[in-house]
Amino acid sequence: MRKATVAAPANIALIKYWGAKHFDPVVPYAPSLSMTLRACRTRTTVQFDSGGTGDDEILRAQDDGTLVPTEESFRAPVVRHLDRLRAWADRSGTFRVATRNTFPSRAGLASSASGFAALTLAATRALGTSVDPTQASDLARRSGSGSAARSVFGGFVVWPRTDDVCAAQIAPAEHWDLRDLIAVVDTNPKEVSSREGHRRAPTSPFFDTRLDHLDARREAVQEALLDRDFDRLAPLVEREATELHCIAMSSRPPIHYWRPATLAVLEAVRGLRADGVAACATMDAGPNVHVLCPPDAAPSVADRLEALSDVEMLLRDGVGPGPTNDVSPLF
Ligand code: PMV
């Protein structure tokens, strides 16, 4: 019996993959580039019993630390991923898994990225195998969550769109202390999953146009990041986020992730900029808004966002170093 615990962070895509050709492993139509977060993370403990028979046990840790069974919609994709990892390691036996997030799950805050990255890293260790980050990234994208492939790295991460190339770090967290203030306007699970969004994306009449210019935008974002040039980065990041939602809204059937509160936050960000505060907004597949800024702007951004009645919760995050094993087990 072997046990391992890993905490893996969520990430926020500055260039978003939206549209997948396959899901096992995920092969995106588009390149993506993300910033790995520090505070929003999933801690997962995995125990592997090579003599075990029967079902895997998938548990969620509650705030008081007690472990409760997870509902089928959560459990099923986890067990499917464990099956893949068992087959990959050529082992038989059963897993016991417990997991806990520091942030709301399934609300478009990339809990599948942190969750499947943590599960992949902890399960491979519990199986007694050792994988380098590139192998871990490749295994993580077999989970069906493409963004999990980026969460095994810290700092700034790029995933080109070629079928067989996996994600890689382009700069460590120390490169640029960017902050991310996450305005949570809705903590309910989203109505349409990212996977369904990836399926529908090519039905948008604007999808091919997006793909035509995305490599150039990805390069421009990467250069602005490497130059630590916030003024160049900000408009590119906002354009990219708006475009993802235009694709979602114009796909068939359409997907509307934004809420009126999303627009209220976007307006506040424009107001901050008009007042000379460096800030820009991005959203993944959900209504919540990530407001990026340099460290000196963070207090003004936080004050402005917290003053909005539409903001249920403000998560103070920023670029982080990636997964760690240096955490206590959940059982
Ligand atoms: O992590 P997935 O494969 O469920 O999809 C992620 C989709 C976006 O967050 C909208 C974009 C991205 O690149 O992270």
Image (cartoon, rainbow, N blue to C red):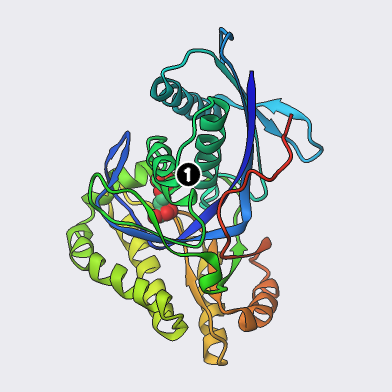
- Whole-percent x, y for residue 15 in the image: 36, 63
Q: Is residue 279 above or below residue 2?
A: below
Residue at left 41%, top 44%?
137
Q: Is residue 120 above or below residue 163?
A: above
Q: Nearer the viewer, residue 190 or 324?
A: 324
Q: Is residue 182 left or right of residue 220?
A: right
- Whole-percent x, y for residue 224 in the image: 39, 78
Q: Amino acid at mark 1?
A: Glu
Q: Nearer the viewer, residue 177 or 13?
A: 177
Q: Nearer the viewer, residue 124 or 12?
A: 124
Q: Is residue 298 above or below residue 83?
A: below
Q: Nearer the viewer, residue 222 or 78?
A: 222
Marker count (numbered): 1
The local crowd at label 1, few if under 14, some if 14 to 19, many if 20 or more residues have their Cα within 10 Å, is: few
Q: Which residue is mark 1?
A: 191
SS of the residue at dot 1?
Answer: loop
Which quadrant of the figure contains the N terminus?
Answer: top right
Residue 207 appears in the picture as rendered? yes
Residue at left 54%, top 66%?
173
The quadrant where residue 305 appears: bottom right
Residue at left 39%, top 25%?
88
Which quadrant of the figure contains the C terminus?
Answer: top right
The quadrant where residue 161 appears: bottom left
- Whole-percent x, y for residue 71 in the image: 59, 26
